[in-house]
Image (cartoon, rainbow, N blue to C red):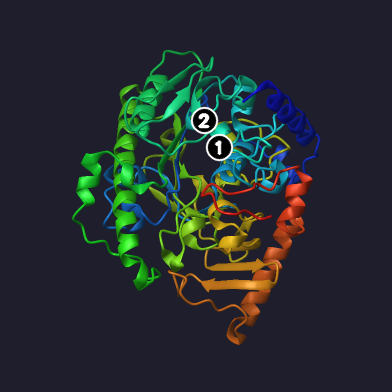
Amino acid sequence: MNSSKLCIGGALLIGLMAWKSAPPINPDLSSQAPVKKPNAAQPNIVIVMADQWRAQDLGYMGNRQVITPNLNKLATESVNARLCMAEVPVCAPSRASMLTGQHALTHGVFYNDRPLRNEALTLAEVCQQSGYQTGFIGKWHINGGLAKDFAPGRLAPIPADRRQGFEYWRGLECTHDYNNSPYYNEVNTRFVWQQYDAISQTDSAIAYMNRKRDAPFFLLLSWGPPHDPYQTAPKEYRQKYADKSMTLRPNVPAKDTLAASRALRGYYAHINALDDCIGRLQAALKGAELDENTIFIFTSDHGDMLYSHDQTNKQKPWDESIRIPFMLKYPALLGRKGKTMDVPMSLTDVMPTILSLSGQAIPASVEGENMAGLFQKPRPAKPNEAVLISCIVPFHQWNYAHGGREFRGIRTARYTYVRDLKGPWLLYDNAKDPYQLQNVVNQPAMKQTQQQLEALLTNKLNTTNDKFLTGNVYMDKWHYPWAAQDSLNNPYYR
C-alpha cells in the first residue's frame, strides 16, 4: 500500500473516531461490585476463540459423530453456558463486542473488515491498567480500513497502536490458508506458522503461559478453523472421517445431502484437531501449576449453517448461525464440578463477566451484562431473559443479491423471534421444534406469545438505541464504502 493511500485511510479513520458512542444501556454497570475472593491473587485469564464453530457440533452438546474428548472433559470441570449467542453472527462484530463489551451499533464494527476505533476501551486495556501482562495469538480481524478493497489489509501488519492493549503479539488480520499462514510479531517482522496454524499457535500459547512472571496474564488465542475451507485439516484428522457416513440435522434438505456430508467430514476434522489443542492447553496449565487460579474460556465468534435450511455460512438468525459454545472454568472460585447455565448470554457479556470474576471494576462504557453471579450460582432462565440478535448490513456471502436482509430479533431460552424491515419474519418454539422446522409467525395460536416477544424485542431496541433502519444509513454514518464486489467476486450492493 502506498503512502498516499495510508494518509487517506488515516484521515478517514480520524473522521470515524469523531463519532460519539451511544450511551451505555445499563448506567449502573460501572457501580457493580466485582466478585471478591479473599486472600487470593488475581487470576490469569485465557480465552480460546475458534472461528465459525457452532454449539451443536461438540460431544458434550450431544453430537455423537464428532470426536471431542478433551472438550468433553473440560465440560465436566466448567460452567457450560448452553445458550450463548453471537449478537451479530459474523467474525469482526463478534470479536469487537467481546473485547469492548459493547453492541455493534456502539463500537461500529457491524461489518467485516472495518476498524475498531482506537478510542474504544477494551478488555486488554482494562487488564493492563490492573497490572496484567497481555498477549494475543492468531486471527485479529478488527483492524479493517475504510477502503473498498479490503483484501490487502487482511495480510498487512497491524501497527502497535491498533492492537487494542495487547503487548505480546503473534497476530494477523485474517487468513483461512491454515497450512501457509503468516503472522507478525511485536515489531511487525513477518513469519509463517510452521505447520497447520492452530497447532503452531497453540505451541506459542503454551510458551507464553509458561513464561516466568511476577504478574497475572491475559492471553487471547484466536484460531481460524473450523471456518471453511473444510478440507484442509491435517491428513491424520481428515482420515478419521473419510469413510464415515454422516448423520445430518433434520433441517438439511435432501438435495444438499452430498454437499453437507462432505463439508461436515472436513469440519469435524478441523474440530478434532482443535480439540487436541485444547487438551494440550489444559495439560500445560496443570503442568505449570496455573490451572487452579486461571479463568479459562472456550468459545467461538459465530456458528455455521452447513446446509441447514438450505443455507451456508453465517449472518443468519437460525440457531446453527447464532448459537456458539461457551465454557468457563475457574476452579479457585467455581470449583471443579461441571454445571450448566441456561440463561441466554452473548459475547457482549464476556468483558463485564471476566472483569467481575477477576476482581476488576467494570467501566461505564460497557453495555453487556455482568453474568458472574450466574456462573457462580446457575439457575433456570426466566421467560423475559433474552439476547438481541441482528444483521445490521448483510454482506459478502449473504449480500442483498444472495437474499441477505437486515433483521433484528431475540433468542430466549425457549423462543426465537425475528423481524425484518417488512415486519415479523420468524417465530420458533425451540422447545417443541429444536431444529426450527416450523415457522409459526403470525399464527393465531401464537398471537399472545408473539405479542410478548415483540414487546421484549421492542424493549431491547429501545434500550440499545437501535432504530432498526436500513443498512445504508449505518454505512453512511460510519463512512463505510459500498464495495464494488464481495469476497467471492460477486456484484455488490450498488
- Badge 2 local density, few (<14 within 10 Å), some, or many (20+)? some
Q: Secondary structure at mark 1?
A: helix
Side of 125 where 467 appears, left or right: right
Judge whether 36 appears above or below 191 on screen.
Answer: below
| Residue 432 disc label | none
Residue in view at x 51 percent, y 63 percent:
318
**Quadrant of the rendered image containing residue 270:** top left
Residue 337 percent across, percent down from the top left = 36, 45
The reply to whether residue 47 is in sight is yes
**Quadrant of the rendered image containing residue 271:** top left
Q: Amino acid at mark 2?
A: Leu
- Taking depth in this image into account, of 58 and 38 the one nearest to the observer is 58
- Taking depth in this image into account, of 289 and 300 the one nearest to the observer is 300
Side of 351 where 210 appears, left or right: left
Residue in view at x 55 percent, y 68 percent:
415
- Taking depth in this image into account, of 159 and 490 the one nearest to the observer is 490
Residue 218 percent across, percent down from the top left = 51, 26
Residues tagged 1 and 2 counted as in contact (Cβ below 8 A): yes
Residue 341 percent across, percent down from the top left = 47, 53
Q: Which residue in the rendered view is the most extreme toward the left?
A: 243
Q: Which residue is mark 1?
A: 151
Judge whether 436 appears above or below 31 on screen.
Answer: below
Q: Which residue is mark 2?
A: 155
- Image quarter where the N terminus lies is top right
Judge whether 137 appears above or below 317 on screen.
Answer: above
Residue 77 percent across, percent down from the top left = 36, 42
The reply to whether residue 35 is in sight is no
